[in-house]
Image (tube, rainbow, N blue to C red):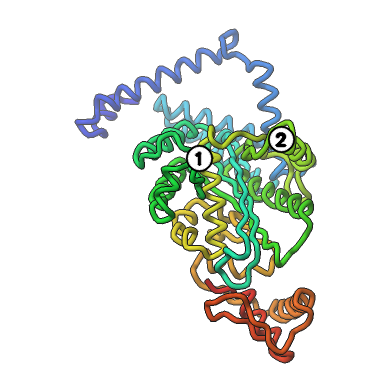
């Protein structure tokens, strides 16, 4: 690059540091070129690097390339990368003709790849190939809100699993933020808890629910600053009173799929850590053993490629990520339940939650089970109910009528709900189905 031209383009106050940065980049590039020559230190990749590169390519192709297209797609990907490397070298050396030629080669390989596997698949493949997979630490905790503490009409006891994913390289930053929060609010070395214990977390307990809200907001803000994202699975035990073993297995499956979805959308590879509840030699060891099939083989919808190890457990008092997971699952479940503490944290929780490409959180960062709760997604996301789909209305009403007959024993003349907020449920044999839908599906807060 012409140094006089370079100097003319940079403001005077930034010329010296910018020139040093450019010189360092050129020296690095020159060193890379020397090491790539035959006989140099970087003349060939180590065997472990070659194996890793082959495995990464296989993982990349598994998502977007059909088996019979792998060889052709591999050649086009190599051509695209080679063009990109020549383009970068030409830009550093100021060789405009070579840069233009390399750009044309790269665009041609991209076009051919799109014709081979489809434009959308080609875009996702090249985007993933241009950046290394990101190591992500995922922390998981669970909670239960009993029916008598649920404030939102139409819901029973809620059990939930919540996961928080933090980019691995930012874990030290997040840990430092948590330490600063403890100092700022005078919490000493206490483990941060959504529902603190009087003896174990006396400083937090003394703050009361309203006094803890600034602490919780600070923790969620630190998580957002570090690029964290969350997924939560909430199960209404009244609407689906399955046995404990079945419910546990199904909830972990739903959680696994949504963690994998979030990792795939960010091209991440995750390690999942659950909160240790008991001795690892007893109940927890049996629990972990029961999850091995899920982590080894995935599900019918999700391959076991993004979560790279079997589930592990750790003590929450030593892991700030698990303390964040405790807050997220507790506050999110409280939000679903209509409790004041969850409603107060609605905005920072929504900022962290994983969403689909269109911005919708339903079934992605938040999964409510059973599906009759789907209208609640809109209340949580927008503060209002969603309009029912016309073509699904008749089927929805029929299914709800059957549900009401199974759980209540047929629509009686009058059925008084347990809420004291005016939301008593009045069913008649003629209008019972519609009233049931209005109160139990279009749930109001």
SS of the residue at dot 2?
loop
Q: Is residue 26 left or right of residue 103?
A: left
Instruction: Tell me which residue sits at (49%, 59%) in the image.
Output: 342
Give residue 287's position: percent from left, percent from top: 74, 40
Q: Please tell me whether residue 392 is drawn above or below residue 199 in the rendered image.
A: below
> Which residue was labeled with disc 2?
310
SS of the residue at dot 1?
loop
Give residue 108's position: percent from left, percent from top: 59, 41
Q: Is residue 356 left or right of residue 218?
A: right
Instruction: Tell me which residue sits at (58%, 32%) in the image.
Output: 81
Give residue 431's position: percent from left, percent from top: 69, 89
Gap between marks 1 and 2, in whole Å? Answer: 31 Å
> Which residue was labeled with disc 1?
200
Q: Please tell me whether residue 78 is drawn above or below residue 223 in the rendered image.
A: above
Q: In which quarter of the view is residue 6 placed?
A: top left
Residue 108 seen: no
């Amino acid at each position: 690059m012409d140094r006089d031209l370079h100097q003319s383009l940079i403001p005077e106050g930034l010329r010296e540091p910018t020139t040093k940065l450019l010189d360092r980049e050129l020296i690095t590039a020159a060193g890379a070129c020397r090491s790539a020559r035959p006989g140099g230190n970087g003349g060939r990749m180590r065997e472990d690097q070659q194996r890793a590169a082959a495995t990464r390519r296989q993982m990349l192709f598994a998502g977007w390339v059909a088996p019979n297209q792998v060889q052709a797609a591999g050649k086009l990907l190599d051509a695209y990368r080679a063009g990109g490397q020549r383009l970068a070298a030409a830009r550093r050396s100021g060789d405009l003709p070579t840069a233009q030629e390399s750009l044309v080669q790269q665009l041609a390989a991209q076009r051919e790849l799109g014709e081979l596997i489809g434009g959308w698949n080609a875009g996702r493949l090249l985007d993933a190939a241009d950046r290394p997979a990101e190591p992500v630490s995922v922390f998981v905790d669970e909670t239960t809100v009993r029916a008598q503490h649920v404030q939102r009409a139409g819901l029973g006891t809620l059990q939930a699993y919540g996961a928080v994913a933090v980019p691995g390289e930012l874990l030290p930053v997040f840990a430092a933020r948590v330490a600063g929060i403890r100092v700022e609010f005078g919490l000493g070395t206490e483990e941060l808890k959504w529902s603190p214990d009087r003896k174990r977390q006396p400083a937090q307990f003394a703050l009361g629910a309203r006094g803890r809200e600034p602490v919780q907001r600070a923790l969620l803000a630190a998580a957002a600053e570090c690029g964290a994202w969350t997924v939560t699975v909430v199960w209404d035990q009244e609407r689906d009173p399955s046995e404990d073993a079945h419910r546990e297995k199904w909830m972990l499956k739903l959680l696994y799929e949504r963690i994998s979805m979030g990792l795939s959308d960010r091209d991440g590879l995750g390690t999942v850590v659950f909160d240790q509840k008991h001795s690892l030699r007893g109940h927890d060891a049996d629990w972990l053993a029961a999850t091995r099939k899920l982590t080894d083989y995935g599900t019918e919808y999700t391959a076991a490629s993004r979560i790279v190890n079997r589930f592990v457990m750790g003590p929450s008092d030593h892991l700030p990520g698990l303390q964040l997971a405790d807050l997220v699952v507790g506050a999110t479940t409280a939000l679903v339940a209509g409790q004041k503490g969850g409603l107060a944290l609605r905005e920072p929780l929504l900022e962290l939650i994983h969403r689909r490409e269109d911005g919708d959180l339903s079934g992605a960062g938040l999964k409510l089970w059973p599906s009759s709760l789907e209208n609640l997604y809109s209340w949580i996301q927008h503060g209002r109910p969603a309009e029912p789909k016309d073509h699904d209305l008749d089927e929805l009403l029929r299914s709800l009528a059957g549900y009401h007959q199974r759980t209540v024993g047929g629509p009686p003349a009058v059925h008084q709900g347990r809420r004291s907020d005016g939301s008593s449920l009045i069913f008649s044999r003629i209008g019972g189905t519609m009233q049931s839908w209005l109160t139990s599906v279009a749930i109001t807060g």
